[in-house]
Amino acid sequence: NMPPAPPPPPSSTHSLTHTNTMLNYHELTMNEPRDSPQRRKQFLVICAIMVVMTLHAALTAGILATITIAPGQFPGGEFVYKFMTKDYAASTGTLRTVSSDLGILEDGGSSNLIIAEDEEGFEKLDTADLLYSILLDDPSFIPGGETRFASGVLLKESNSNNNGGKMKKLLLEDANALIAKEGKEGGTHSKDVKYEVGKLPKVKAAVAQHPFTAGAFSAILQSYKIIPKFKQYAKDHGKSGQSPVIIATCSAKQKMCTYYMPLAKRDAFYMGKPTMEKYASTFDDASMLERMGVESFGGINFGKVGRGIKRMLGMGGSSSSSSKEEKKDEL
């Protein structure tokens, strides 16, 4: 009994056919006219999918949701926080850092990562009313990317007597010590910024709720829908003399954020930092493009051009302030 003969090697024709099937779609259609009906149909399908996805994200984030502001109360308490100077959209990432430092577990991955387990590790608890972000500035008066916020843990009387001390130690001692040990202090990422602690008063506040997804649309709506709504409320209720401070805490379970605007003791919420009015005065020479976050284009520094025009027209500041700005530009 002879063993069966091995199969013949693949012919060159078979190899060529196999190679052709490995070519991608664009290579196979490269000779097809650009304005062919098939390509137009493909383009329209892709555009339709993108529009549907964008609309779904916008609707989920609450672009059509109404905002009802009502009188309420901000609970106050001891606030352990990271102080950041960035776009307000970065507050969500800062809360992720705080959550990580506290050992709070993620739930899913598409929400705001503010779901925690209890001491036994079984029941999941929504940490809304624990993690807060305080938006200190009015984006319409501050250049893009220069707005300030504080994100952290609010230790109220209800949690200060049990695990509040443990959370405070985790942040002020353990997390800060790790930052110093790794030599990252002074960086721009939230992981490289040390925790601070401040006292927030219990005050009357304007309160509202709005849907929340932790995505880009939530960040956009926060700056261009929610903050302006509170500003209008302040104006209608005789509080327009000062820029409002907005405080947010978000529930991943309910996909909802609760916003507070303190109606008294506003300056206490800056926790020793300059008020919005004082901070905004440092940007008096900023051009409109700088306020939008565009400092230069094509080698042209809009800040220098604007200051030069003001000085030429006799509208500039003192010579000391001019030299100060020049030193700042050199740095």
Image: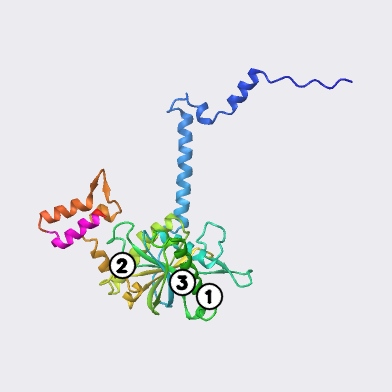
Disc 2 marks which amino acid?
A: Gln
Residue 318 located within the stretch drawn in magenta: yes
The residue closer to the viewer here, 38 or 162, is: 162
At 44% from the left and 62% from the top, the residue drawn is 94
Q: Which mark is residue 48?
A: none
Q: Spatial distance from mark 2 to mark 1, Cα to Cα?
A: 40 Å
Is 321 positioned to the left or the right of 30 in the image?
Answer: left
Report the residue marked by disc 3: 172
Image quadrant containing the C terminus: bottom left
Question: Could you say whether the residue bearing mark 2 is in a helix, strand or loop?
Answer: helix
Which sits in the foreground, 307 or 182?
Answer: 182
Q: Which of the marked residues, 3 or 2, is nearer the chain's N terminus?
A: 3
Q: Is residue 60 visible?
A: yes
**What is the number of the mark on residue 232?**
2
In percent of the image, x 84 and y 22: which residue is there?
3
Q: Amino acid at mark 3?
A: Leu
Magenta highlight range: 315-329
Q: Which residue is denoted by mark 1 in the rendering?
A: 166
Mark earlier in primary sequence (1, 3): 1
Q: Which of the two marks, 2 or 1, is nearer to us in this view?
A: 1
Please report contact status of discs 1 and 3: CB closer than 8 Å, yes or no. Answer: no
Q: Residue at x 47, y 53 (%)?
A: 57
Q: Nearer the viewer, mark 3 or mark 2?
A: 3
